[in-house]
C-alpha cells in the first residue's frame, strides 16, 4: 500500500475538538484552517484557528449562531481573501 500524497492534517492539541476545514495557501505559504465551536447559552460560538508548523493563530469568538451547523454554514461564507485578511490581522 502506498503512502498518501498529502500528509494528514495536524490536530490542535489545545483544541482537540476543532474541525479541520481545509488549507489556505498563497505562493510558498500554507496554513491549515480549523473551526472550534462551543455552546454559549442557547447559542453556539465559533472561532477560527490557523496552523502552520509550530505556529498557531486564533481569532476571538467571532461567530455566534443558533446551532453548530449554522456556525459552519456562516464560516463557509468567508472567501479565501477574507480568511487571509483575518489571518494577517492576527499576526
Image: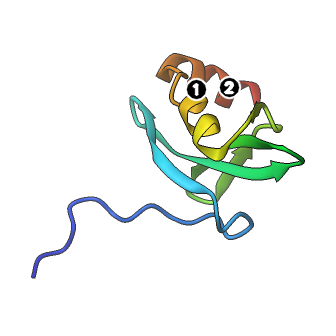
Image quadrant containing the C terminus? top right
* Disc 1 to disc 2: CB gap under 8 Å: yes
Q: Residues within 10 Å of mark 2 (few under 14, many from 20)?
A: some
Quarter holding residue 67: top right
Residue 77 locus on image (x, y percent): 53, 22
Q: Residue at x 72, y 44 (%)?
A: 57
Residue 5 locus on image (x, y percent): 20, 61
Q: Secondary structure at mark 2?
A: helix
Per the model, the C-alpha gap separating discs 1 and 2 is: 5 Å
Q: Secondary structure at mark 1?
A: helix
**Residue beneath disc 1:** 83
The outermost residue toward the bottom is 1
> How is colour applied across the structure in the image?
rainbow
Nearer-the-camera pick, 26 or 59? 59
**Residue beneath disc 2:** 86
Q: Residue at x 73, y 41 (%)?
A: 47
Amino acid at each position: 500500500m502506498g503512502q498518501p500524497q498529502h500528509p494528514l492534517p495536524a490536530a490542535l492539541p489545545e483544541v482537540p475538538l476543532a474541525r479541520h476545514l481545509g488549507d489556505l495557501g498563497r505562493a510558498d505559504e500554507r496554513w491549515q484552517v480549523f473551526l472550534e465551536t462551543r455552546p454559549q447559552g442557547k447559542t453556539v460560538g465559533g472561532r477560527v484557528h490557523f496552523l502552520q508548523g509550530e505556529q498557531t493563530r486564533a481569532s476571538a469568538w467571532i461567530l455566534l449562531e443558533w446551532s453548530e451547523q449554522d456556525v459552519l454554514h456562516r464560516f463557509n461564507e468567508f472567501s479565501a481573501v477574507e480568511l487571509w485578511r483575518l489571518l494577517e490581522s492576527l499576526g
